[in-house]
Image (cartoon, helix red, strand yellow):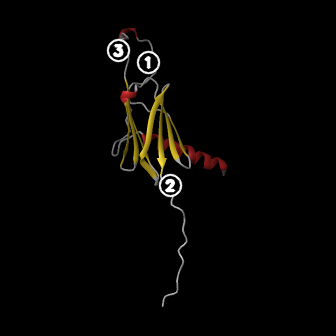
Amino acid sequence: MDDMLELRTRINRLFEDLMGRLEPGEMPTAGGEWVPRVDLYELPDRIVLLADVPGVRPEDLEVRIEGGHLVMRGSRRQPQDVDPTALCRMERPFGTFVRRYALPEGIDPEQVHASSREGVLEIVIGKREASAVRRIPIRPSS
């Protein structure tokens, strides 16, 4: 039974990874796009996203909160100083990417910070303080 649950989790992750890189209504393509790998943590007071974006300059990155989603876009440029005729092997993808993540209730769009260091984009989204549970007394009606 545990094997089936693990398989289901892996399939769900693969599907979410595929869908996370598409715009609404966009179909999967086999073009030159690339998808940065992402770690996502939900902590009691914030959500932290770490994305591998080596070779992407901070000015080529965009992070937005839009319609209850975190949208991350970027572009990695092909080196201009390399003669294409000298190319023997090319494994690093270039071009644009888009990742979109649905955000849970309770995030604070005013508490979003993004920074890029050593090829890792870090996005921190603060959460609003959860309202305390309050019991409402019931009075007998007269």
Quick one: SS at disc 2? loop
Quick one: SS at disc 3? loop
Q: Decide which of tag 1 and tag 2 comes sooner along the chain.
A: 1
- Crowd band around label 1 with a 10 angstrom C-alpha radius: few (<14), some (14–19), many (20+): few
Q: Residue at x 54, y 68 (%)?
A: 134
- Residue matched to label 3: 80
Q: Position of residue 70 (x, y in %)?
A: 41, 44
Kindly report which numbered mark, 1 or 3, lies closer to the viewer in this rendering.
3
Q: Position of residue 46 (x, y in %)?
A: 51, 46
Horizontally, is 9 left or right of 106 in the view?
right
| Residue 129, disc | 2
- Crowd band around label 3 with a 10 angstrom C-alpha radius: few (<14), some (14–19), many (20+): few
Horizontally, is 42 left or right of 96 in the view?
right
Image: 35 above or below 131: above
Q: Position of residue 111 (x, y in %)?
A: 44, 45
Q: Amino acid at mark 3?
A: Gln
- Residue matched to label 1: 90
Q: Amino acid at mark 2?
A: Glu
- Crowd band around label 2 with a 10 angstrom C-alpha radius: few (<14), some (14–19), many (20+): few
Kindly report which numbered mark, 1 or 2, lies closer to the viewer in this rendering.
2
Q: Residue at x 52, y 83 (%)?
A: 139
Image: 132 above or below 84: below
Mark pair 1, 2: CA separation: 48 Å
